[in-house]
C-alpha cells in the first residue's frame, strides 16, 4: 500500500468514526429527552408561574389531561400558559396519555389562546409530546383539523408568544403548540417530524435502526439552531435537566424573560407579520443552505 492509499484509508476511517460519534451523541440526546425524571410542564409552571389557575375543558366535549393550561403571573406579567403534560409514574402517564393530545386538548389550547388575545396577555407554551394521540377515536373526532386550527389560532395572535421545547417534540402534535414568535429549546430536547423508531420502521422496516434514523432526522437543538427552526438553545445542567430541575428552571426562566422583553418592544401587527414570515421561510432553499 502506497502513502496516498494509506492516507485515503485513514481519512475514511476518521470520517467513519466521526459519523459514529455523531450518531451516538444524537441517540443519547433522544434518550435524555425521554427520561421519565425530566421536569414536566407542571413542574415548570410551579417553578416559574405565580398564582397559576388551571382552566379545564374545551367547552364542547371534554377535558383532555394531555394538555394543561391556565392563567398566572410570570415576572409580574399576567400570562396564559399552555403545555403538554406527560406525567411521571405509569398511572400519571396513563392519565395524561403520555402527553399525546386528542382533539379536545387542542381545542382547549385554542380556547386559552382566544382568552389571551381578548385580554392582551402574553402566551407561554411548553412542548413535550411524542406526537398527537394516534387512536381511532381521536381521528374520528377530527384530530388533523384540531391541530391545523390550533396552529392557525397561534399564527393569528397579536400578543407575544414564546414556545419552549422541554422534552420530546414530535410531529404535528408538537408543532400545534409551537407556532410562536420565539421558539426556545432545551439542550437535550428533541424536535422532529417523526420519532426515530417510526422513521426506522418506514425506511429499514426495523425499529432497531432508530439510532441511524435519529442521526438522519437531525432532531437536536444544536442541529436545528443553524437551520432557523428554533431561535435559542437553553443550556441544561450537566447530565440533563432531571439532574438539577431547579437550575434548569432558572435557565428556562431567563430565556423566556429575555424573549418576552424583546417581543414587547414590537407593535402587535409587527409581531404577527414577523411570526408568519418566520414560518414561511422555513425550508426555503437559498443556494448555499437553508435560509434562517
Image (tube, helix red, strand yellow):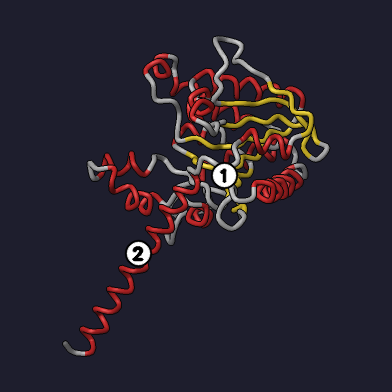
Q: How many numbered marks appear?
A: 2
Quarter of the rendering occupied by the N terminus: bottom left
Q: CA distance from mark 2 to mark 1?
A: 31 Å
Across and down, in percent, residue 232 comes to: 61, 52
Q: Residue at x 39, y 21 (%)?
A: 135
Name of the residue lying farthest toward the left: 1
Q: Secondary structure at mark 1?
A: helix
Across and down, in percent, residue 178 comes to: 56, 37
Residue 189 visible = yes
Name of the residue lying farthest toward the bottom: 3
Q: Is residue 98 left or right of residue 114?
A: left
Q: Is residue 47 left or right of residue 28?
A: right
Name of the residue lying farthest toward the top: 60
Q: Is the C-beta separation of discs 2 and 1 under 8 Å?
A: no
121 in relation to 193, above or below = above
Q: Which residue is mark 2?
A: 19
Q: Which residue is mark 1?
A: 278
Graded by Cα atoms within 10 Å as few (under 14), some (14 to 19) or many (20 or more), the crowding at tag 1 reads some
The answer to which of 223 and 275 lies nearer the viewer is 223
Across and down, in percent, residue 17 comes to: 33, 69
Across and down, in percent, residue 249 comes to: 68, 46
Q: Residue at x 72, y 34 (%)?
A: 122
Give the label on residue 222, or none. none
Could you tell which of marks 2 and 1 lies nearer the N-terminus?
2
Graded by Cα atoms within 10 Å as few (under 14), some (14 to 19) or many (20 or more), the crowding at tag 2 reads few
Frontmost of labels 2 and 1 is: 2
Residue 147 visible = no
Q: Secondary structure at mark 2?
A: helix
253 in relation to 22, above or below = above
Amino acid at each position: 500500500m502506497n502513502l496516498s492509499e494509506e492516507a485515503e484509508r485513514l481519512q475514511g476511517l476518521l470520517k467513519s468514526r466521526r459519523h459514529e460519534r455523531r450518531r451516538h451523541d444524537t441517540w443519547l440526546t433522544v434518550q435524555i429527552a425521554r427520561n421519565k425524571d425530566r421536569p414536566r410542564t407542571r413542574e415548570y409552571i410551579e417553578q416559574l408561574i405565580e398564582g397559576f389557575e388551571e382552566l379545564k375543558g374545551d367547552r364542547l366535549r371534554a377535558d383532555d389531561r394531555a394538555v394543561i393550561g391556565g392563567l398566572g403571573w410570570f415576572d409580574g406579567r399576567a400570562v396564559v400558559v399552555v403545555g403538554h403534560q406527560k406525567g411521571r409514574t405509569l398511572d400519571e402517564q396513563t392519565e395524561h396519555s403520555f402527553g399525546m393530545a386528542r382533539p379536545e386538548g387542542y381545542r382547549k389550547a385554542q380556547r386559552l389562546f382566544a382568552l389571551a388575545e381578548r385580554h392582551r396577555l402574553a402566551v407561554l407554551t411548553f412542548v413535550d409530546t411524542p406526537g398527537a394521540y394516534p387512536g381511532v377515536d381521536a381521528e374520528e373526532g377530527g384530530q388533523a383539523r384540531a391541530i391545523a386550527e390550533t396552529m392557525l389560532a397561534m399564527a393569528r395572535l397579536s400578543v407575544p408568544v414564546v414556545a419552549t421545547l422541554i422534552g420530546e417534540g414530535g410531529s404535528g402534535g408538537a408543532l400545534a403548540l409551537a407556532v410562536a414568535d420565539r421558539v426556545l429549546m432545551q439542550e437535550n430536547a428533541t424536535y422532529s417530524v417523526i420519532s426515530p423508531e417510526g422513521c426506522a420502521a418506514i425506511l429499514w422496516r426495523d425499529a432497531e435502526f432508530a439510532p441511524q434514523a435519529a442521526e438522519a432526522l437531525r432532531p437536536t437543538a444544536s442541529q436545528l439552531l443553524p437551520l432557523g427552526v428554533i431561535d435559542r438553545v437553553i443550556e441544561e445542567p450537566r447530565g440533563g435537566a432531571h439532574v438539577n430541575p431547579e437550575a434548569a428552571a432558572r435557565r428556562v426562566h431567563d430565556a423566556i424573560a429575555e424573549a418576552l422583553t424583546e417581543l414587547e418592544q414590537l407593535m402587535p401587527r409587527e409581531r404577527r407579520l414577523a411570526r408568519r414570515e418566520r414560518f414561511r421561510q422555513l425550508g426555503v432553499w437559498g443556494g448555499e443552505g437553508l435560509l434562517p
